[in-house]
Amino acid sequence: MPPVRACSSSASQARTSWPRSPRCWPGTAGGARLQEASLGDGALLLEQLDGGRALSGLGLFDAAEIAGDLIRQLTIPAPPGLCQLRDLATEIAQTLRPRQHALDSPVPARWVGQATGLAAELAAEAGANLVHADLHYGNILAGTRQPWLAIDPKAIAGDPELSVPELMWTRLDEAETASDICALLAAITHAAVLDPAKARAWTIVRAVDYWLWGLDHGFTEDPVRCHRLLDALAR
């Protein structure tokens, strides 16, 4: 899934151009330590990591607990000058229905309505913590200083619950039932010490957002995963 892009003029635009933020986290906060950088060349020198051992290689629920613990470690006060989660949430709330209409309403209307309302609520209560907005299992590598470290951050100022949705759908096929999906959400939320209602809300909002984004960009499998995720959570 393309990571969120908080500073775009349209939530339906491609989000891969949002700049990486390698300097935001100190090396003691669950993120890989940056040794040197040539950002103009797109080159980073990180501390020693095992590129052949990502968290995607562990069992789903073991990986979910480790990822949740990293969310907790990565939650520190945000530095100034970052994109704001309240702006992203407001943009999503304002654009979901127009995007749904433009695609001939592929998402059940009740889910679009629920996601729109939740996005507005999330915008109104957005926090000011540093959030890794591209935290999936492939972006967590085995380290030497710590057993697991996050890489490739896209930073936003807001709530750590935003990190949950991508951890839900990137391995959703391994959660065979609706009960498994709910258990996966609970495992991540518990390990990260997050607000369960807010984690669920962000997962619903981003699943609808990504469903529409995926259809608009010709994706086929990912909208199906979003449908399964919403069917389990948006009740």
Image: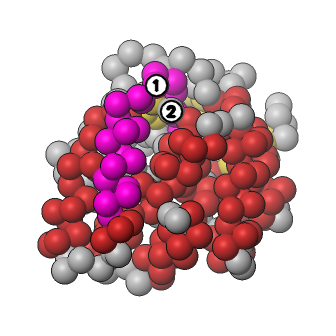
135 vs 98, left or right, is right
Q: Residue 80: give x, y in percent of width and height.
A: 39, 15
Residue 138 visible in the displayed image: no
**Callout 2–callout 1 Cβ contact below 8 Å:** yes
Please tell me in which quadrant of the rendered image residue 124 appears.
top left
Magenta run includes residue 126: yes
Q: Is residue 173 above or below residue 147?
A: below
Q: Residue 195: give x, y in percent of width and height.
A: 62, 37
Pick whichever, 56 or 10, lies toward us. Answer: 10
Q: Mark 1: few, some, or many residues within 10 Å (few <14, many ≥20)?
A: some
What range of the chain is rendered magenta?
112-132
Q: Amino acid at mark 2?
A: Asp
Please tell me in which quadrant of the rendered image residue 96 appears.
bottom left
At 71% from the left and 34% from the top, the residue drawn is 193
At 74% from the left and 69% from the top, the residue drawn is 180
Please tell me in which quadrant of the rendered image residue 145 appears.
top right
At 59% from the left and 70% from the top, the residue drawn is 232
Q: Main secondary structure of the magenta part?
A: helix
27 vs 81, left or right, is right
Query: Circle 1 sits on which residue?
Result: 127
Magenta run includes residue 39: no
